[in-house]
Image (cartoon, grey):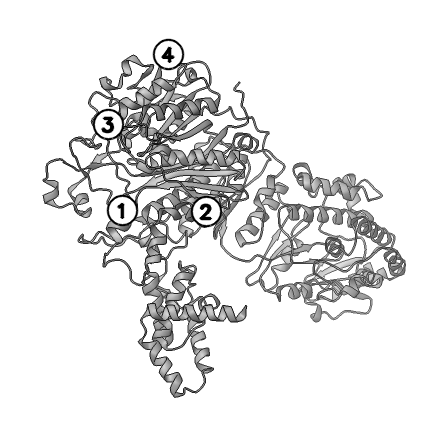
Amino acid sequence: MTEYTGLEIAVVGMAGRFPGSSTVEEFWENVLAGEVGVRRFTDEELDAAGVTAERRAEPGFVPVGGALDGIEFFDAKLFGYSPRDAAVLDPQQRVFLECAWHALEHSGHLGGGAEVGVYASASVDTYLLRHLWDNPAVPGGLQPLDLLLANDKDTLASRVAYHLDLTGPAITVQTACSSSLVTIHVACQALLGRDCDIALAGGVSIRPPVHEGYQYTEGGILAADGRCLPFDVNAHGVVAGNGVAAVVLRRLEDAMADGDTIYAVVKGTAVNNDGAGKVGFTAPSVTGQARVIRAAHDLSEVDSSTIGYVEAHGTATPLGDPIEVAALTQAFVHPPSACALGSVKALIGHLDAAAGVAGFVKAALAVGHGVVPPSPYFTAPNPETGLEDSPFFVNREVLPWPGEGPRRAGVSGFGMGGTNAHAVLEEPPSPEPMPPGRSRHLLVLSAASEQALEQSRTRLAEHLAAGGHELADVSHTLRTGRRALRHRLAVVAGDRADLTGAWTGSGDRRDVVFLFPGQGSQYAGMASQLADEEPVFRAALDECAAHLPFDLHEVLADAELLTRTKYTQPALFAVEYSLAKLWRHWGVRPVAMLGHSVGEYVAACLAGVFGLRDALELVAARGALMDALPAGAMLSVPLGAADLDLPPDVCLAASNAPNLSTVAGTVEAVGRFEQSLAVTSRRLHTSHAFHSSMIDPVLGEFAALVSRVELREPRIPFVSNVSGTWITNAEATDPGYWARHARAAVRFSEGLTTILANGPANLLEVGPGNVLSTLARQHDLTGSAAYGSLRHPREDKHDLDTVLAAAGRLWIAGADVDLGALTAGERRRRVPLPGYPFERARHWVDLPGTAPREAEVVVERAREREVTATGDLAVITGIWQELLGIASIGPDDDYFELGGHSLLATQILARITAGLGVVLPAGAIFEAPTPAKLAATVEQLRAHEPEQDDEFARLLAEIRDMSPEELRAELDRERDAQEISQS
């Protein structure tokens, strides 16, 4: 078994796009097959890249390269970009942003909750230089600062941190060709130094136009025939490639403790520079390279004889390859009997700033899978390298890993200018066995659109059908490792997941109201399965049992005992209280509560009116007093309380719904009343006539019991059964109120109406069965919804089916649910799952002088939403459409959802002021973020304008004559003056 020093770093996630492969999985398949992604470009591609026929005919022109297809496409809406801003954003930054998302998703750590650092590198931005600079096709209204922010390499890491909400360090690293391997070194150091808990490291190199080819020159580093053949006798240069990759890193001890899938272990990394000890600035150095490799071995505490493979820098240049082999031979103090060499540049070309991370990914997969990747192109060693006299060789076929010890590999990255980097990788530890999962699992998915959600569902279903991961681990990864987006899906599954029956939806109905049922909802075995599988629920139930004068667990299992009121009421309280504690543990906290009869005691206890011991003693005493009373009867009548014509010996016991009431009295009185009704009523299975005059004999004694208990003002609002409206502090702390509460009719219907008057809410029944949620649905629930927490006794399903379904549906509705808390006390593994299906549209500025391609876009708005705007609204809408780059904007579209930002807002306000002659305040677009609201603001300002005098008319004329840039500057000066005066 491998012994670890405590300084190891785990590779827990990877993502990338390379020439010939759009995922890391495809990339590895191509590596094993020796599939070359570098290719010859078609005439159509060369035309689009602006390559003229004259240039193609020049001697030495090579129409070959490692192109990354689809770089002009981007999911701008997901990341909050307007089409205009997306079109001028460096494709390196967009592609790396999507790659970062997929890498963190692959690791199971996109959900947040940890300090994540970003360490990234990029190549020179040729998109700005060749596509944007002095190009009349660039969208109008852009300032130099806009182009700079969209294309400066310095913003690369910070852009990822901003859009993915990552709060660790965000550092862009630039050391030429070694940049992305240096990002991994810096990330490892940051993890060991506790700068962050998770690190995303990688690089991107996209140099548009990517289908251009290159000009070969004698003595240069580029290959004459478009083939990169590292260490081969026929090697004569490198081929440029485009690509992106990122890895997610954690301290090994943390990754193992959290059940991360570990793909490889970084034993150590080192970085140095050649200094001046070489023939020129761009030349490599044997000494510098050897020193960095030896340093990595020493820091890793690894004997060089145990390394079975080296992913070399391998540029196939006449100078570079011999120096690299010499440096390796010198660095391996204890050389192995044989060590394979390879270079991914043979397949995908030289990715410049992304070359190091591409090689790192290849080596990580090699040690993880236990195979030495092949180099099928290889024929014979370049005699200048001295390979035949070294311990190194280039294998043509896939080989099993040599040796008996841990699989280890080295990765080299050497930057032009002399910054060298080397990393030592080791095979991952065997995953620890996990305990069995629970019997039911909540699976969730989310996406930015319905289409993306459906595609995610399809991908996940195919993945689950293929098997390979425990459903409990899949559930855990989906709940804790993904970003929660607007459109959502949830399903509860047992041994196998069937996503066809999932609930879907989207909403922002955040408020949750707890409803606590009363006597009559109980049944034998209620919540028993929940007690078996949910420790939080079980602990709360045990706490309640400790304060009761009987064996609570025996009562809950005995149908006969549960018919006795003295047992029923405290048993109901205990189950509902424990269920509420579980919901609160899952992050669901009510904004208000409403109980039905004895259920109000649970609400009062959670609100702090009673302590738990006092509440249980009172409920037990209440039940015992009522249990000793003479038998009575209760009748459910399908009429509203106001429609009942009750005789003196029959009392209204509950107003449950607009057309449903309950009455109570003696058995004889209720029987006579039942016979007099013209509607079909239903006798309830109760032993007593609760909330009727038959309760009167015990009210005084009960009030005296309550007076001995400390009563406190409620900290959470709840509705009174007695009044049907919000309980007051005076009522909650009055013993007489609690006596009246036992006698008065339960005003549940009126109370629910009070709750709903505050706006849409999620009504969550916190107790057995679905009585209250059924009653709630008989009210006008427009915008609201009702859910049950526990199954109905006649339902043949597991308790977890119901409570997890409620959790999923609350999450879909937009309520705060801590999905990670569902299995917080359980060890589970984070497993790789299908990545997010980006909905990419073409956002691109074509090269000057080339025929623009027809834009391929995702239709974001239904045509029937379009309206013909007039007046101020038409002017405002037109300005928005021009500056946001969106052809169709509706009056109620939100500026920020369309991709607007604060810098652009100033320009928009300046244009509106110039066009409409109304000076808008600097924050107008934040207060009125839709065209319709902004038009209303303009109208209000006009209505309150003073009568124009000559001076005002002169100023207005000046404003109208200003250019947008001049007006923007004037508005900025006005805003600054206002801020100074306010401070």
Q: Which residue lies at the image location 65% right of the left edge and 48% below the top edge?
A: 583
Q: Earlier in the sequence, mark 2 or mark 1?
A: 1
Q: Earlier in the sequence, mark 3 or mark 1?
A: 1
Mark 4 Cα-neighbour bin, 10 Å: few <14, some 14–19, many ≥20: few
Q: Which residue is mark 4?
A: 337
For badge 1, the amino acid type reads: Thr
User: What is the CA distance from the residue labelled 4 to the residue labelled 1?
Assistant: 45 Å
User: What is the CA distance from the residue labelled 3 to the residue labelled 1?
Assistant: 24 Å
Q: Position of residue 694 (x, y in %)?
A: 85, 61
Q: Which residue is mark 3?
A: 317
Question: Which of 391 and 28 lies nearest the eye of the viewer?
Answer: 391
Q: Secondary structure at mark 2?
A: helix
Q: Position of residue 947 (x, y in %)?
A: 43, 87
Mark 1 Cα-neighbour bin, 10 Å: few <14, some 14–19, many ≥20: some
Q: Which mark is residue 374?
A: none
Q: Which residue is mark 2?
A: 161
Q: Secondary structure at mark 4?
A: loop
